[in-house]
Amino acid sequence: MSWHASVLTLFPEMFPGPLGQSLAGRALRDGRWSIDSLDIRSFATDRHRTVDDTPFGGGAGMVMRPDVLDAALGAALATGGDRPAVYLTPRGRRLDQAMVRDFVAGPGLVLLCGRYEGVDERVIEARGLQEVSIGDYVLSGGEPAAMVLLDACVRLLPGVMGAAESGVEESFSDGLLEYPHYTRPADWQGRAVPPVLLSGHHAEVARWRRAEAERITRERRPDLWARYTENAAAPGAMDGRPAAA
Ligand code: 9D3
């Protein structure tokens, strides 16, 4: 059984969406992972197929009903191994590369996408949902966040990335941002490629790239730079570590 994602959503037709293209799409067709989306509304039991209701205590907006969500979660969790259930929500723990690695090490995920103001707190407790955010900006729902999380997971599955793109030299693998890249033409609109890259001196090229990666990291991401300098004594100490704390 390959790594399996079940997505619970009011918009099941959004999936696989962009995950059906490119790297993730090829891996999906190759059977390295699988996805199904479950329509939360299909678990409603009343005549009007109600999935939300007004908040106790008053206030704006609607809250997703615990009974409907619990039935949907139960159906998803009944298949595909003992998978963690994740609720995508702005108040969740921020996704990082370490979390992604943990998710990939398991049998897959059950992802709950919220709409409206949120879900009834009791279903979060009862199902032990892990609350995850993808960052500090406001989306209109959890679906794009689920796609981001799945994209980050799928590319790490065995056999998904080719040798060229794989692991070792990528951004964050040693805790630094990427150095600048150049290709032909060597002069473009009066802009020359840094001469060292044309010199053929591999050690000098490596030194230049390292220096540029460090400069860019220091300038743009003081948080990453601080961690990098703390870990400078241990070679490889930052391998695969998250982009940010
Ligand atoms: C208008 C409602 N807001 C009141 C403070 C809260 C709110 C709830 C749900 C705002 C946005 C959303 C929809 N977003 C997600 O479901 C979501 C999300 C996000 O907006 N940013 C980052 N990560 C995530 S994961 C799910």
Image (spheres, rainbow, N blue to C red):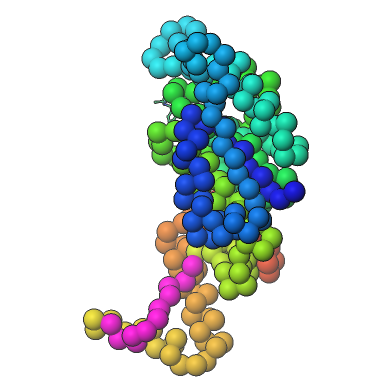
**In the depicted structure, whether residue 141 falls above or below residue 205:** above
Q: Main secondary structure of the magenta part?
A: loop
In the image shown, does 55 or 193 lie closer to the viewer?
A: 55
**Quadrant hosting residue 23:** bottom right
Q: Please indicate, yes or no, whether residue 136 appears anywhere in the rendered image.
A: yes
Q: Residue furthest front?
A: 47
Q: Residue furthest top?
A: 57
What residue is at 40 percent from the left and 17 percent from the top? 61
Report the number of discs.
0
Q: Residue furthest left?
A: 189
Quadrant of the image where one finds ligand 1: top left
Counting from the top left corner in percent of width and height, residue 200 is at 50, 93
**Quadrant hosting residue 184:** bottom left
Counting from the top left corner in percent of width and height, residue 86 is at 62, 35
In the image shown, does 238 or 5 lie closer to the viewer?
A: 5
**In the depicted structure, whether residue 189 falls above or below residue 166:** below
Q: Is residue 180 magenta?
A: yes
Q: Please indicate, yes or no, whether residue 242 appears anywhere in the rendered image.
A: no
**Quadrant hosting residue 121:** top right
Task: Give, as a single range, the part of the protein colored magenta.
Answer: 178-188
Counting from the top left corner in percent of width and height, residue 216 is at 44, 66
> Is 38 left, or right, of 90 in this rendering?
right
Q: Is residue 51 magenta?
A: no
Counting from the top left corner in percent of width and height, residue 96 is at 58, 48
In the image shown, does 96 or 84 lie closer to the viewer?
A: 84
What residue is at 64 percent from the left and 21 percent from the top? 71
> Is 47 left, or right, of 190 in this rendering?
right
What residue is at 49 percent from the left and 77 percent from the top? 209
